[in-house]
Image (cartoon, helix red, strand yellow):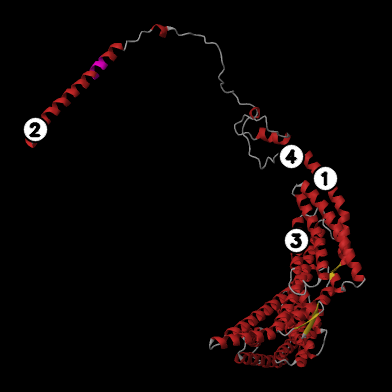
Amino acid sequence: MTPSVISDPRFITLRIFEVERCWAYAMQLKEEVSEQACKRFHARNKLRKAVKLSVSLSKFLESLTFEPSTRLEVQAYVSWIHGVLQFDLQEWKLAKEYLESANTIYSGLSKSADDDFRELYLSRIEELTPQIRYCAYNIGDKDAATDLRKMLHGNDTDEQIEQLIDQARSKEAEKVTEITWLGQKIPVKLEEARLAVLALQEFDAEIKALDQSNQEAVIHHYESILKTCVTGIAAVREAMSSMDQIQSQAVGSSTGDAASIAASKRQAQATAASLSADKMSRTQLLLSFLQYSKLERTVGRGLAQVSSALSMAKTKNPLSVKEDMLGTSSYPKAQELARLYDTIVQNLSEVQSLPGAVQESPELQITLKARITAYRTFRCFYLALAHGQNKKFQESLALLSRSAKYAKLAVNELDELDAEVNAKKIPGAFACFANVSFKTLVSQLQILTSSVPSEEVNCRAEKMLFLAQGSRTTDPSTAPKSDKPLIEDLNTFYNKSELEQKVLNSKNGQPLVAMPPGYLPIPMKTTFFDLALNHVEYPSYQERVRKTVEEQSAVQSGGDKANNQGSGISGFVKGWIWGGGK
């Protein structure tokens, strides 16, 4: 294809398609590649071919007349293709230069383009920025990894950024060899556990740097760290199970006579116990640390979900949430908040029951108990609001009273713990759990305590209003409808609206009384006496009875005579034939 042949812009599109086809095929091979060197080599060859075709395209377009913006787009495209190749070859400096060149061109074009093209240029800039920061990180920029994580919080669905962050963490995780938790040093040798520990170390600083008003980003950050913790816990458990299998195989692999087998078993048991007891305890301690960290972040996620729900409700109805982010009786989903706080209480109870160092730390157990009491207060408070919304006013008042008692108890416990922390009787690390300190929790409980009396007054007012509206009876929408006229249904109370509805919607057209009324039997004196039957004579049955008795007696006497005759003949024959006369 020569410049003289080109008569339509679509000819240039064909040259661009050649470059795009090679690049797309290389990306497909990179997704399919695992450990196959041939596919990885093939993918790089396709990228080299795409670079060669892009350079040819650039030289080809120099001999044609185009707008300046089009020439700049071509230069940016060629620089981007070169940067992708160098990025794959891990030539970080060259890749950074090429990608920054493309990014600069797109930034300039976005300033002078119209709205439609400006969005395209800005999207290209967003795609290039993570790769540029990753190249800077590999060159030696320490802030690049933090910038990548900030980009991830801004774009939850960018898988490329997540992959780059994982690659950066895998390199940093090699430096993590030991951690200190509850006064004990724990060696970390598993790669997945190292990644989890590194992510936990970075988590607290990153969560504080996030904008807390952006609850979606905060919740996403908690979910990402929880996934990392789950992966680390699974790896540690698998290592512990493999250690148990090795120990059992070492004990049961002896052969020979009984004495040698017994001696070898004792020796194997002693050796296995001496070698693996310490290792198993350290691994169990690492598992407890990861489980503790996971549950702590789970509690933090639950609190973030509570804040998110209250913030969304406040934007819709400002009266449903107070300025201090405490729900009121106007909040429509109090049951949901009660469920979230119930989950938080369960997670704290699981932390209390963790084996090992957690059980051996009485200070930690005391602080966890106080926090459980505090969050039970919030659960009880929102359950009271939920019962009030369901017209269960007695239960609501009882729960409000109980929440006030819980709040007073929790405030006293937390104040004592805070004083002990200040006196350094309890480690300062125990004063903050899930980024919530003792002082913050105490202030929230005091706000709740001050809100309980107003909620009780509101509950009583709603109860009186409910009773004044005649709601003590069964709801007519749920009660069975009666088609009887009102005169037959006097034991049922109908208010004015229900009575009008019954009169208007009567099926038989007789809402008040049945018309005509039905016949009823009543006692009264007879008007006619029939005495004719008193003079009727009936035939006598005496003659018929006498004849019947005579007939029955005659039949009976004839039967007896026949029986006597039969007996005489049979006796005669029997004696004559068988010699009965002997």
Which badge, 1 or 2, comes first in the chain's sequence?
1
What amino acid is labelled 2 in the image? Gly
Q: Residues within 10 Å of mark 2 (few under 14, many from 20)?
A: few
Residue 354, by quadrant, is bottom right
> Which residue appears farthest toward the left when viewing the image?
576
Picture disc at residue 342: 3
Residues in magenta, as a range: 547-552
Label 3 crowding class (10 Å Cα cut-off): few <14, some 14-19, many 20+? some
Residue type for callout 3:
Asp
Residue at mark 4 = 472
Q: Position of residue 108 (x, y in %)?
A: 81, 83
Principal secondary structure, stretch drawn in magenta? helix
- Image coords of residue 373 (percent x, y): 81, 61
| Residue drawn where x is 74% and y is 93% of the image | 91
Amino acid at pointer 1: Arg
Residue at 70% of width from left, 75% of height from top? 230
